[in-house]
Image (spheres, rainbow, N blue to C red):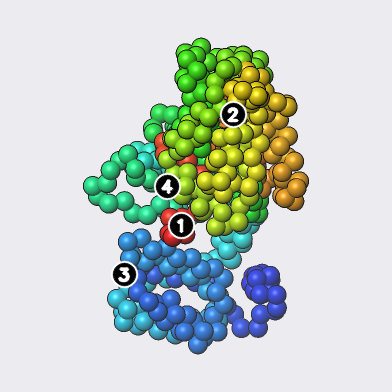
Amino acid sequence: METQKKEIVSEVHGEPSCDAKKELILLRITGEDRPGLTAGFMEILARYNADVMDIGQADIHNTLSLGIMIYVDEANSGQVMKHVLFKASELGVTVHFAPVSEKEYNAWVERQGKNRAILTVLGRRLEARQIGAVTKVIADQGLNIDSIRRLTGRPPLHADMETTKACIEFSVRGTPKDKSELHGQLMKLSSEMEMDCSFQKDDMYRRMRRLICFDMDSTLIQTECIDELAERNGVGAEVRAITESAMRGEIDFKESFTRRVALLKGLDVSVMQDIAEHLPMTEGVERLMMVLKRYGYKIALLSGGFTFFGEYLQRKLGIDYVYANELEVGEDGKLTGRYVGDIVDGQRKAELLRLIAQVEKVNLEQTIAVGDGSNDLPMLSLAGLGIAFHAKPRVVANARQSINTIGIDGVLYFLGFKDSYLHM
């Protein structure tokens, strides 16, 4: 038994322990938080040369929960507990002591090697029924919750529900019994309970995302530019019908694109500038772009729409790359009903994501893709994190993550950002 204890200390600290008999004690400290509280307890532990084997703290509405596991000489443990109790009384907090066996400790060490994942849950508001349903899925899959943190700020009691956001992040450990079933259960809850869920492996790639690729129409902007052009040319109904059929995956994108562009023949190109200046921006897009640029992300717009509008957004939002379709303009300044070059369809979007990642020297696992239509599925599948945003049912069914309840700045929470990081 003594040999095992020596091995524990040697493994954690890289040096052998002394011959004195030691014991493991878990300190649980609760009460009102205040500056210097942790330092006060550490001063006592340092006085008796206690090893800190683990430490964790949470603070909820100024209520502290602090856990410290120490490894201390048995000859000193009584003095440690006595002085810790005195300090707790002085600070107005409560402390409980629990002995930890070597078997329990070794089991804890073994669990550290298990797979970790991050489950993010967001919506306009999160109620007990939603959190309860999600945590039941976690438990049913044999996963254990290590920690819970709120990513959004505390909402006012009488907030406008159309603009509020609520997000909670669970750090979980273990291997799901059935990952496909887990994904299906979370997506089902999302559709039934007005929330969005993201389940991601917690690894170095998740913490080092560097490139994000967006669709444009119905993603960064709340319209389809080709529909806007069609309305100005008096063919709105015809083009919308083709657009909707294509986005549902009922007809080939290239065929639908060619048919729609042909209907734009004769439209004066000056109309495009007016449409660009009045594009309805998606909720949260400016905030999202500001944060991404601040933290060094490369941003690409990969669109089955048109370069004119993509380049307008590039100037407005500070986008790094724009790839879209070029409309042919005749000598009379009117659209010819044809396009120039290759069509940016679903496969081309995936190819471009891969190409930009190579240029930026970014691993594909460090990339993110966000889109709403069937032609976005290839890049959503290729990216390390693919997010269907306010997407069509077929896209949501085939995506690993989706956001349907809040604006596009919800992407930031799937990346692990807290509101407290995002203040100007």
Position of 207 with respect to 42 (left or right) is: right
Q: Position of residue 108 (x, y in %)?
A: 58, 59
Compute the Cα span from label 3 to label 4: 25 Å
Q: Disc 4 designates what residue?
A: 167
Mark closer to the chain start, 3 or 4 = 3
Q: Callout 3, which amino acid?
A: Glu
Mark closer to the chain start, 2 or 4: 4
The percent position of residue 298, horizontal first and vertical second, equals 63, 50
- Find disc 2 in the rendering and name its residue: 305
Residue that label 3 marks: 32
Whole-Å distance between the Cαs marked 2 and 4?
A: 32 Å
In the structure shown, which secondary structural element does the residue marked by tag 2 occupy? strand
Residue 21 vertical placement versus 386 (above, below): below
> Residue 378 at what x, y percent from top left?
66, 30
Callout 3 crowding tier (Cα within 10 Å): few <14, some 14–19, many ≥20: some
Report which quarter residue 122 is drawn in: top left
Name the foreground residue: 65 vs 110: 65
The amino acid on which the numbered mark 4 sits, given as a three-letter code, is: Cys
**Residue drawn at (30%, 41%), measured in percent from left and top?**
161
Q: Quadrant of residue 194?
A: top left
Residue at the outermost bottom position: 47
Q: Secondary structure at mark 1?
A: loop
Q: Earlier in the sequence, mark 3 or mark 2?
A: 3
Q: Nearer the viewer, residue 323 or 178?
A: 323
The local crowd at label 4, few if under 14, some if 14 to 19, many if 20 or more residues have their Cα within 10 Å, is many
Q: Sequence-wise, which precedes: disc 2 or disc 1?
A: 2
Q: What x and y, as percent, mark residue 134? A: 44, 39
- Name the amino acid, label 1: Leu
Q: Is residue 392 above or below residue 221?
A: above
Residue carrying label 1 = 422
Report the quarter where the N terminus lies: bottom right
